[in-house]
Image (spheres, grey):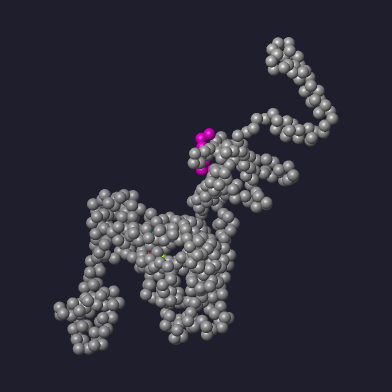
Amino acid sequence: MFPSSNSSFSPSAMFSVYASLSGSMMLFRSMLNDFVPEQLRSYIYENLMGRFFTPKSKNLTLIIDENSKFKKNQVYEAAEMYLRTKIGPETERLRVSKTSKQKHFTVTIAKGEAIRDTFEDFQVKWLCVTENEKSDKSDKAKRHYELKFEKKLRERVLDSYLNHVIAESEKIKKSLRVVNLYSRDVHGCRDDDGGGAGAGWGCISLEHPSTFDTLAMDPSAKKKIIDDLDRFLKRKEFYKRVGKAWKRGYLLYGPPGTGKSSLIAAMANYLKFDVFDLDLSSIYGNADLKRVLLSTTNRSILVIEDIDCNAEVRDREDEIQGSGKGRGKRKHRDDVDDESDDDQDSQLTLSGILNFIDGLWSSFGDERIIVFTTNHKDRLDPALLRPGRMDMHINMSYCTGLAFRTLVTNYLGIDGLNHPLCEEIEKLIDSTEVTPAELAEELMQDDDTDVVLRGVISFVEKRKGKKNKVKAKEDVSACKEVVTDKDDSHGKQSSMKNQKQAGKPKGRIMKRQKLT
Ligand SMILES: Nc1ncnc2c1ncn2[C@@H]1O[C@H](COP(=O)(O)OP(=O)(O)OP(=O)(O)O)[C@@H](O)[C@H]1O
Ligand SMILES: [Mg+2]
């Protein structure tokens, strides 16, 4: 029927070939329509004919369904989060949503929209596809993403690109995460995920604005804390290898108003960890403590503020001697063996608390941080201070000149380095005991920067003068005591004790003794 390859094509021969071919095709098609059932026909068209007549594609498409085996598909969720950051000007339709509890709008690409992404040296194309699930009478839309790329990139997309999408989405999720503040005297929980803790914990979102940038602290001390937190987060395998629970304890100590609570908020905002604020006076005993602590969640900071004010963790001698002062029921860890389990469970003891810090119960949960704060480190039970109990002791002390610069930037919005009055204040502060809270108060007194800074100078000078006066008074009275009771060894001892309480070194007394 076809002319041989070496024969010449005349128009009439070509026309006759075309006519006979199209005639045969029509005949074949009408036979197919008349005798073959519709389903089989579409199969032939789509699969057999398509295979022969469609040119082979160079591209590969991955289908990423919303659910996999009735569970959320992690790749789909990651893609949804990741693609939010890839929406470009060429996108024409977007989906926007927000619940009353969410802070930000959720913007995702709409059905049929495509997004191109570049990774390393190749490009991929994402397509959002929504199909109606016919089997489902509720007409629920079934969604999936299609990820299109060149076939030769298959390994790189599956190995590197999808992992990159998941890692990036984790970062985005972390940055969007609302940090919750849990307490046992709050009811209900404003938790978007509907998750949260049980055992009476209620929560609100922690909207404390403190960050490591706004925290006035010695820069090197601040860096040490940030590095410690970073190292802690990265060390999951390390903790496993050395046989230690993946948790870290910080003891923050210092006078009121030096930023202990602000540091906790800064840590929570930095790590995006929830905060569990535990008031020990609301705990009935070790059993209750166990229940309450076990219901806290991973990636959280457990805070026990003013731990020296909790009778359970101070006055160890009192407990050991069983003097009956304070709460007679308190028991020390060393006495645990003598007590029945029932007794232990109905009392809150230091041993109960320590059990959660480094005892058997310390291994519950992952990525836990425990923070104790105190204004009086010296009042704490030495058991709490023993090496290994609290991993880092952080001294939140009076404000230093360097820390004051951060306050100036926070409150006045200027760089303290460039202001002549700041230099003077920094020198003054370094030799005076003023807290960041006091200085913060002064920095809010006026809108005029110079007026404010002069106010700070007179405040600090006043404080310095007062302190010098008190010091002089104490020195004089100490000297008097030494002089009047010169031969009385008891008197000498008591004057030394006074000096010690005032926080002064013994050397000063000796000097004064010689002078008088
Ligand atoms: N280091 C600091 N950096 C920035 N602001 C601070 C700092 N310390 C205190 N402030 C300011 O003073 C206020 C009180 O500080 P904060 O509650 O953190 O002190 P604290 O050490 O926890 O005090 P307390 O021992 O009474 O609990 C904070 O809200 C903040 O405005
Ligand atoms: Mg505090």
Residue, far right: 35
At a point 26% along the width and 50% down the height, the residue shown is: 419
Q: Is residue 461 above or below residue 157?
A: below
At a point 48% along the width and 71% down the height, the residue shown is: 357
Ligand 2 resides in the quarter of the picture at: bottom left
Q: Nearer the viewer, residue 477 or 496?
A: 496
Location of residue 514 (image quadrant): bottom left
Q: Is residue 37 magenta?
A: no
In the picture, the quarter occupied by the C terminus is bottom left
At a point 27% along the width and 83% down the height, the residue shown is: 494
Q: Nearer the viewer, residue 274 or 355?
A: 355
Is residue 301 among what the camera can see? no
Q: Is residue 172 above or below residue 471?
A: above
Tell me where residue 267 appears, x and y as whole percent: 44, 59
Q: Is residue 463 above or below residue 378?
A: above
Location of residue 443 (image quadrant): bottom left
Q: Main secondary structure of the magenta part?
A: loop
Task: Say whether residue 312 is left or right of residue 466.
Answer: right
Is residue 167 among what the camera can see? yes
